[in-house]
Image (cartoon, rainbow, N blue to C red):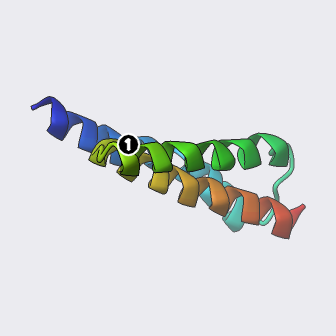
């Protein structure tokens, strides 16, 4: 049961970034959004992905791959609309 819960959390957690992505791309502005913070969030995901792969931890892999993708979308939005 805990494994299923963690898979759900691994998917739902990164989805919480979607409002930020929509705000940037719909309003076409990244005012007040820190590229340093979002770049660091993106980069911090990489060692976690490697760890998850090495230890065969599916929730960690799913969560941090999704985190990497959504954080990259924010960084791309900041670069486009800043």
In the picture of the structure, the residue carrying the numbered disc 1 is 60
Looking at the image, which residue is at 65% across and 60% down?
72
Looking at the image, which residue is at 61% across and 59% down?
22
Q: Residue furthest front?
A: 54
Quarter of the image where the N terminus is located? top left
Quarter of the image where the C terminus is located? bottom right
Res 3 visible? yes
Q: Quadrant of residue 78?
A: bottom right
> At which x and y percent is residue 41?
66, 42
Looking at the image, which residue is at 46% across and 55% down?
66
Q: Quadrant of residue 60?
A: top left
Tell me: 28 left or right of 6. right
Q: Residues within 10 Å of mark 1 (few under 14, many from 20)?
A: many
Q: Residue furthest left?
A: 1
Tell me: 6 left or right of 50. left
Tell me: 46 left or right of 49. right
Image: 4 above or below 28? above
Total marks placed: 1
Tell me: 2 left or right of 53. left
> At which x and y percent is residue 6?
26, 36
Looking at the image, which residue is at 83% across and 43% down?
36
* Viewer-proximal residue among 18 and 53: 53
* Viewer-proximal residue among 52 and 4: 52
Res 27 visible? no
* Viewer-proximal residue among 34 and 46: 46
Element marked by disc 1: helix
Image: 12 above or below 76? above
> At which x and y percent is residue 17?
55, 47
> At which x and y percent is residue 56?
29, 47
């Amino acid at each position: 049961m805990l494994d299923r819960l963690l898979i759900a959390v691994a998917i739902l957690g990164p989805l919480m970034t979607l409002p930020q992505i929509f705000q940037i791309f719909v309003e076409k502005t990244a005012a007040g959004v820190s590229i340093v913070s979002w770049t660091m969030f993106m980069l911090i995901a990489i060692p976690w992905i490697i760890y998850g792969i090495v230890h065969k931890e599916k929730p960690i892999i799913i969560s941090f791959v999704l985190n990497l993708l959504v954080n990259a979308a924010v960084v791309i939005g900041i670069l486009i609309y800043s």
